[in-house]
Amino acid sequence: MANNPPQNKKRLNDCSQDELIDIIKQLRKRKRYGLVWEEKPERVVDQCKKELPVLDQDQDMAIEKNPAGRTNLMIEGDNYHALSVLNYTHAGKIDVIYIDPPYNTGSNDFMYNDSYVDKEDSFRHSKWLSFMNSRLTLAKGLLSKDGIIFISIDDNEVAQLKLLCNEVFGEQNFVGTITWEKRTKAQNTKTARDMFQTKTEYILVYKKSTDKIRFNLEVSGEKVYDLEDKKGLYRLKHVEEMSAVGMRGRQTMVFDINGVSPRKGYQWKIGKDQIEEYKARKDIEIIDGKVYLKMRPDDEINQKFLPFWSHFFEKDTYGTAEKGKTELNEVLGTNEHGFETVKPVNLIKKLLFHINRGRNEVVLDFFAGSGTTAQAVMELNKEDGGSRQFILATNNENGITEKITYPRIKKAFSKSVNKDSVSANLRYFRTSFVTKNDVSDDTRRELVRRSVEMICVRENTFTKKYDNKDYKIYSDGKVSTGVIFDLDSIEEFKEKIDKLKLPARLYVFSLSNDTYESDFADLEVRHKLCAIPESILEVYRKLFI
């Protein structure tokens, strides 16, 4: 207080006790450490205060190769609007996010409010941070409890991004920084002589919660699993002995293993607890009086693992930006696409390989660009039999979705999908809007009418079974999804739902958030009711306050 001007002292002296307490509380709320920038308003963010984003499907862009497989999604539109919609359809359902956002180099790579941000812009970093903060905040709500996000970046914003992610995801959820060699060739231009040539970029890795995350890691050394039983492949590992004399001698390491004990004066090299695990699994064999353990490929005991990002494999496995551009040229059949730097497919495949979620992860990329993530997901599924699902979001700036992203996905489908593939469908959507009008009854009716595609995405049911002005019913062969607009048609609606004989999720139009549960009590199929549009409005209220 001693440094305050006299007039400020007088103001404080004139304050009541309650007012002083309030001032102290406000001061305590001030940030003591962290990233501070000047928030710059963004048009697409402010738009959501007046208009509510929805999805419109383009049926002509759909790709169906395997009706029983999972459906991948592509959303054309500003990614802030796409993320807003996904917070209704996929909150807490995304396992992996990979993004390659604008690096804010000042060379026409980052657009804010319809204008490119150049190096002379005094608010260059503030605009980028405002842009990223709004999107990362929405993205966090999409991640599952054990979800993880990978963010590519370079020297221009890596320091700022690290501090921003510490705020959004929590410093305690920082997993690590991957350094990726993007270039192997030297630059030989006049400009290059006057600059510091960089070869690397970074991938920041954050998790959703403080819970431990298990990664798939590669085993070092050559391990040959040349034997097989009913449980699968295995190799035999001899349980060795060591001297029990001296400081390392322990009587607890002297015990019987299926009738075999170590020689006198010796002890086992493996403890009793580990042996008991193998006994329980019936993975112990006695051959010629010697003890052997059945070691299986997924057995982590006594295995040595390579680091998450091993430089030993980098050049051969991950590829470079030059490799990524070559891959895009080959898929599109031309190098006239405008992408000078493209992430290689193997880079994304390698990141996805390390995620241990049963090979059925939902993967989101909301800076989809040329569509590398989609191709990586499809190729990885084909290689390991996985059923991963990708969701892409990108705008159509300079016709990128029409000329590059969608054609690349379509061609990748023809190369990556076969009769055994389980991830063989694509649905294409564009973001659209419903005028808010203070959420009047008319707004609610319009939002319900326009939310059917969002509900299909939420429930992952796209095959239309019944369609009229009063209700719509969809199915994927395992469950059904019904949306009823007019309760006067409820009996007919229930008859159609029962006819499908599938568990049902039913969305009921209601101005009062009433699901009319008693009216559906006589349904024969197992079902769950949800009132719309209130369930949608509740999500948007939290996002757009």
Image (tube, helix red, strand yellow):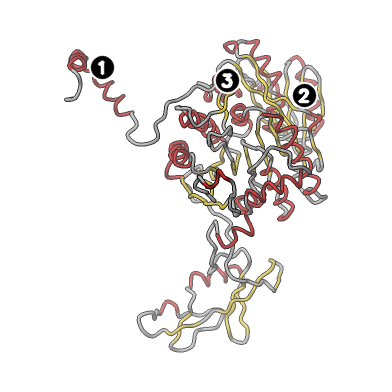
Give how far across and how far down residue 166 sits, in percent: 44, 40
Q: Amino acid at mark 2?
A: Lys
Q: How far separated are the C-alphas under marks 2 and 3?
A: 27 Å
Image coordinates of residue 37 in percent, x first then y, are: 41, 29
Tell me the crowding category of disc 2: few under 14, some 14 to 19, or many 20 or more residues within 10 angstroms, Cα based.
some
How far, Cα to Cα, is label 2 from label 1? 57 Å
Tell me residue 373's x, y (percent): 66, 44
Query: Which label lies toward us, 1 or 3?
Result: 3
Q: Amino acid at mark 1?
A: Glu
| Amino acid identity at mark 3 | Cys
According to the image, label 3 marks what residue? 48
Residue 147 appearing in the image: no
Q: Which residue is tagged 1?
A: 19
Residue at the spot x=42%, y=45% of the render? 172
Give the residue pinned by disc 2: 472
Q: Earlier in the sequence, mark 2 or mark 1?
A: 1
Query: N-terminal of the two: label 1 or label 3?
Result: 1
Tag 2's secondary structure? Answer: strand
Q: Is residue 287 above or below residue 484?
A: below
Task: Tell me the residue at 58%/15% (across/down).
Answer: 50
Mark found first going from the N terminus, 2 or 3: 3
Taking the image as shown, residue 167 lies to the left or right of residue 520, namely: left
Quadrant into which the N terminus falls: top left
